[in-house]
Amino acid sequence: MDQRFEAIDRRLDFIQQLMLVRIADIFGLIGFIVWDRYATLRPMDTRLKQLEREL
């Protein structure tokens, strides 16, 4: 009986760690998306400011 509880406990620990890794992956992906959008829009923003100064 104790062996079954230990096996279940190990599986739950594994699942918990897997969930933490997945959550970290999701936050990392969100951070990358935000950074990529900022990096993509930065040249356009610089160009727009340059055009405003010229006018």
Image (tube, rainbow, N blue to C red):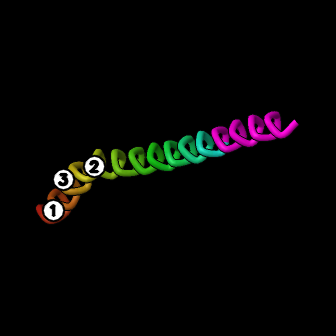
Give the CA distance from mark 1 to mark 2: 25 Å
The residue under label 2 is 39
Residue position marked by numbered label 1 in the rendering: 55
Residue 38 horizontal/vertical position (percent): 33, 52
CA–CA distance in space, label 3 to label 2 = 14 Å
- Of helix, strand and loop, which one carries label 3? helix
What residue sits 74% from the left and 35% below the top?
A: 7
Eye-nearest disc, 3 or 1: 3
Q: Reading the chain from its start, which is encountered first: label 3 or label 2?
A: 2
Which sits in the foreground, 49 or 42? 42
| In the rendered image, the vertical position of residue 4 relative to residue 49, given as above or below | above
Residue 14 appears left or right of 21: right
Residue extending furthest toward the front: 2
Quadrant of the snapshot with the C terminus = bottom left
Foreground of the two, 3 or 13:
3
Q: Distance of mark 3 from mark 1, alpha carbons?
A: 12 Å
User: Is 46 colored magenta in this rendering?
Assistant: no
Residue at horizontal 35%, vertical 51%? Answer: 35
Q: Which residue is mark 3?
A: 47
- Prevalent SS, magenta region: helix
**Magenta region:** 1-15
Closest to the observer, 36 or 13: 13
Give the structural element (helix, strand or loop) at label 2: helix
Are the residues at dot 3 and dot 2 in contact (C-beta closer than 8 Å)?
no
Q: How many marks?
A: 3
What residue is shown at x 29% (from left), y 45% (from top)?
Answer: 40
Q: In the rendered structure, which amino acid carries the disc numbered 3? A: Arg
**Residue 51 at x, y percent in the picture:** 17, 57
14 is within the stretch colored magenta: yes
At horizontal 36% and vertical 47% (from top left) the residue drawn is 37
Is tag 1's residue or tag 2's residue first in the polypeptide sequence? 2
Secondary structure of residue under mark 1:
loop
